[in-house]
Image (cartoon, rainbow, N blue to C red):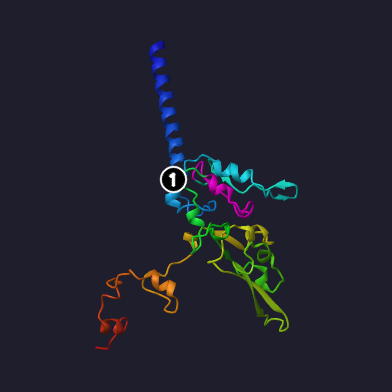
Amino acid sequence: MDNKRRQFITSLIQASAAAAAGGTIVGAFVEENKNKPLTLRPPGALKEEDFLKTCIRCGLCVEACKNRENKVIIDGNEIITLKLGAPGDNVAIGTPYFIARTGPCFMCDDIPCMYACPTGALTPDMCKNDKGEVAIDYAKMGVAVIDPSSCIAFWGLQCTACYRACPEMDKAITIEWKKNERTGKHAYRIPVVHEDACTGCGMCEMACVTEKAAIKVFPRDVFLGKAGDRYVKGWDKKDQQRVKNASTKTTTETGRSKLSPIQNLNQGVTWDQ
């Protein structure tokens, strides 16, 4: 085989390998930049789909968080809340996120990360109350969820770590007293999360004393249900406004609903001939 032919074959093999490697890298990048439903975003973040379209991956929010005034030092280590998604983080690359267990949002009053955003991916509109007032207390980064089977307070042990760590104490988390039937003379002090007041900051999750947190923060769209337009709280004028434009023509169709009442009553019944 002459040198020219050998060089040609070698170049062809190298080009094929480079193309394959490039395809793998591009594929990995595309996969990393897909919507990750369990990602916790900074305060003021748009809905995840809109956030990914609006965020330009500039990192200014992360820098603002890092340089915030109310720095938190635990065991000699400064806790940095926001991180930028990197390959392998299972988060859209270059976008800000936080891990509640190791670096929750510390609820800065001036919300520096939000106001550092140049595109509106983080916006005060997502931190407003019904009166239009903007405050970190109205952020909706996620919602805390308690696992009763692993929360030691549900065992009867006296633990209020999540309750005491909550910045919205007695609003987002309250303590419910319940008689301990096992002992007959002690009380359970059970933490209860109220989703309407929970900001999803994650400070409760970080404070949880169990090996694997018994209280976890999830994005609200992942965990919270939705009653829809067919159900309304008749005693709540605000809830009535929610459905004022609802259609009355909406129907539900299932395999069973297509049957006549008689067919439904007789379903599964075998008659003697």
Q: Residue at x 44, y 32 (%)?
A: 22
Queried whether the magenta region covers residue 267, the answer comes back as: no
Asked if 26 appears above or below 195 in the picture, the reply is: above
2 left or right, relative to 125: left
Residue bearing the label numbered 1: 54
Q: Is residue 183 above or below residue 215?
A: below
Residue 249, given in percent of the width and then of the height, sits at 27, 72
- What is the quadrant of the C terminus in the image? bottom left
Q: Residue furthest right?
A: 76
Q: Nearer the viewer, residue 236 or 4?
A: 236
What residue appears at the point 42 percent right and 32 percent down from the top-left corner?
20
Count numbered badges in the picture.
1
Between 82 and 244, the residue placed more toward the observer is 244
The question of residue 98 being in magenta is answered with yes
Image coords of residue 261 (percent x, y): 27, 83
Give the residue at x 47% y 60%.
Answer: 221
Badge 1 element: helix
Q: Is residue 181 rendered to the left or right of residue 49?
A: right
Q: In which quarter of the view is residue 180 placed?
A: bottom right
Query: Label 1 amino acid?
Result: Thr
Left or right side of 147 for 46: left
Image quadrant where one finds the N terminus: top left
- Residue 7 image point, x, y percent: 42, 15
Q: Quadrant of residue 264?
A: bottom left
**Secondary structure mostly seen in the magenta stretch:** loop
> Left or right: 205 with respect to 124?
right
Q: Which residues are magenta?
A: 92-116
x%, y% of residue 141?
53, 56
Question: What is the crowding at mark 1: few (fewer than 14 residues within 10 Å), some, or many (at least 20)?
Answer: some
Q: Nearer the viewer, residue 8 or 98?
A: 98
